[in-house]
Image (cartoon, grey):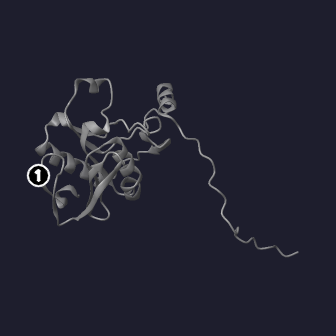
Amino acid sequence: MAASILQPPISSDPPLPRKRFTRVEVDQMLDSGIFAGQRFELIDGELIDKMGQKPPHANAIQRCMTMLLKIFSAELVRVQLPMEAGPVDREVSVPEPDLAVLAEAKPDFSRRHPNGRELTLLIEVSDTTVRHDATRKRDLYARAGVAEYWVIDLKGRRLIVHSGLNEEKGRYASIRSYQEDEVFAIESGTGQSVSVSALLP
């Protein structure tokens, strides 16, 4: 008897249900030692693996940090540290942006993470995560009240700047893309000009 050829299904199956974690559950797993030696961040109930950094990614973070330290005091610049998401996201998200700039260094940050309104600038360096950073994380940061958000697109050799935050709608009014040979002004209170090429490895 000849074997029959299976045809692809006419309609696709609905996505399988996935377990979404809360920050309380993740904290309990951390306390139990399940994730010892691993790095991840909780975004919308999903644990996103923060894979080891390739040299271009690490170099771009270093370049950005060097630039920020020329403009802001060292106590205001944070590298890969957690922040509080906005109220609607707080129970299922604990983002860790690559770089952040505090509006001011408050003593109680030793007991809590800063929230979005206490950060004037966030930066994500993207090699394989541009779409995620420029959509899902953009919306997360806007809802948190972050005034200005950059995505450094390593493969595209460009900088995407999100600004003009509309806090009521939880979105950025302005999204601009700057190419490697362009210069742009930091909108978060300084107005200082920066070359995009200085941020790219």
Mark 1 lies on a secondary structure that is loop
Counting from the top left corner in percent of width and height, residue 70 is at 11, 45
Residue that appears at 41% across and 54% down: 132
For the image, the number of numbered tags is 1
Q: Is residue 42 above or below residue 152?
A: above
The quarter of the picture where the N terminus appears is bottom right
Q: Residues within 10 Å of mark 1 (few under 14, many from 20)?
A: few
Q: Quadrant of residue 112?
A: top left
Counting from the top left corner in percent of width and height, residue 164 is at 25, 52
The quarter of the picture where the C terminus appears is bottom left
Residue that appears at 80% across and 73% down: 4
Q: Is residue 191 visible?
A: yes
Give left or right: position of 165 versus 47.
Answer: left
Q: Quadrant of residue 168?
A: top left
Give left or right: position of 166 versus 187.
Answer: right
Counting from the top left corner in percent of width and height, residue 161 is at 26, 56
Decide which of 173, 121 is in the foreground and name it: 173
Query: Residue furthest toward the bottom?
Result: 2
Decide which of 137, 82 is in the foreground and name it: 137
Residue that appears at 30% across and 33% down: 114
Q: Quadrant of residue 178?
A: bottom left
Amino acid carrying label 1: it is Gln
Counting from the top left corner in percent of width and height, residue 65 is at 20, 45
Identify the residue under disc 1. Answer: 192
Decide which of 3, 79 is in the foreground and name it: 79
